[in-house]
Amino acid sequence: MNAEVIAIGTELLLGQIVNTNAQFIAQKLADAGHNLYYQTVVGDNDKRLTAVFKQAQQRADLIIVTGGLGPTQDDITKETLARLLQRSLVKDTVALAKIQQHFEGRQQAMTSNNLRQADVLEGATSLANKTGFAPGMLIVDKGITYVLMPGVPREMKPMFEHVIAEYLTRNATQPITSRVLRFYGIGESRLADVLNTLITNQTNPTLATYAGTYEVSLRISAVANPLKTAAVLLDEMEAEVQALVGNFFYGYGETGLEARVIEQLKQKQLTLSAAESLTAGLFQATIANHAGVSTIFKGGMVTYATSLKTDLLGVDAALIAREGVVSKGCAQAMAEQIRLRTQADIGVSFTGVAGPGGQDGHPAGTVWLAISTKTETTAHLYHFNGDRQSNRERAVKQAFWLLNQRFS
């Protein structure tokens, strides 16, 4: 099916809300084997919304709409579409009962506009809203399938996953099987350049690159044909990709670099601790963003001041006087000391110059990372060229990459 996604809401046009729904739906459409040629964002205006619907009818047979199903006067999606399709609005009794029970249970007065959320297009299949009030709708009219869903992501996503995803799979003419490869240390433009021959000559499978935060993904998508299964086609294409850029590859799917390292630490039953200067706890906070890390993460220290590096962490003051805090020796000592003091298997340290100015003759972006184990301590020098925050984030990402390399 040829799909178009319409996101409704003036707040989207004003930049007050990021349209994450469009990205989510686009990925799901690609996974299910449907074409998505257009995405449209339109404000809460009946005239403009009607024009957008009419335009979509000319070029799509699947129109997916998010937003405008709420109780306020500017929530006009279903009213506008109802007029365009010349259909009435009727009450969804299940949704109506849910709304009434909500207010009765809280002993709150219910305003009449709340009842609008239970309205659905006549002849539509109602889509239960597990986390909100307004039901979604699916209706086929003159060969075009319309899907209406709430704009709130926590309401839209479960609705899509529970109902729409299966519908799309069932109605796909050419199911697509995809495999996502993840890379670090190579930019999107460089990756595309190295894979240029494969991309230029692609037919089936196809290749698409996606830039992430200091890393990049490659989606390989295949349509099964009578001669080979999709899995075989993916395997063959991946082998060609790995031969060209395999040294930057670290994993598959939705698992990012940090999550992969944490999984590896858990599998190997290894513990980790960190001593941070310029990153000021960002590495440890990144680890703590993942659930269940207490089994592998001992903790650490933020020793931003030189005095804390010596007094708290135990780095030799003579070493700092001789080499400075932005040095290989200081980074190694920090990693060793935090490992020993926390009795962890691995100690990681960060020292350097975040910016914007230089320090002790070192330009902004100078970073020393060190990793200490019971058998060795290694230090690595980097020169990042971003702003202050970017340099700190790059340092953290690079540390995870170094840890990943140890497990590969």
Image (cartoon, grey):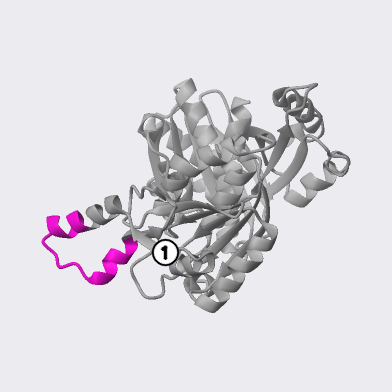
Q: Please tell me whether residue 58 is drawn above or below residue 276 in the rendered image.
A: below
Residue 130 part of the magenta segment: no
Residue, x 75% and y 32% (percent of image)?
246
The answer to whether residue 362 of the structure is visible from this angle is no
Q: Please tell me whether residue 20 is drawn above or below residue 74 in the rendered image.
A: above
Residue, x 84% and y 47% (percent of image)?
193
Q: Nearer the viewer, residue 61 or 163?
A: 61
In what element is the residue under mark 1? loop
The answer to whether residue 180 of the structure is visible from this angle is yes
Q: Nearer the viewer, residue 156 or 85?
A: 85
| Rendering quarter of residue 37 | bottom right
Query: What segment carries the magenta color?
Result: 100-117
Q: Position of residue 392 (x, y in %)?
A: 55, 55
Q: Please tell me whether residue 266 is drawn above or below residue 212 in the rendered image.
A: above
Q: Nearer the viewer, residue 252 or 392?
A: 252
Say whether residue 109 is left or right of residue 63: left
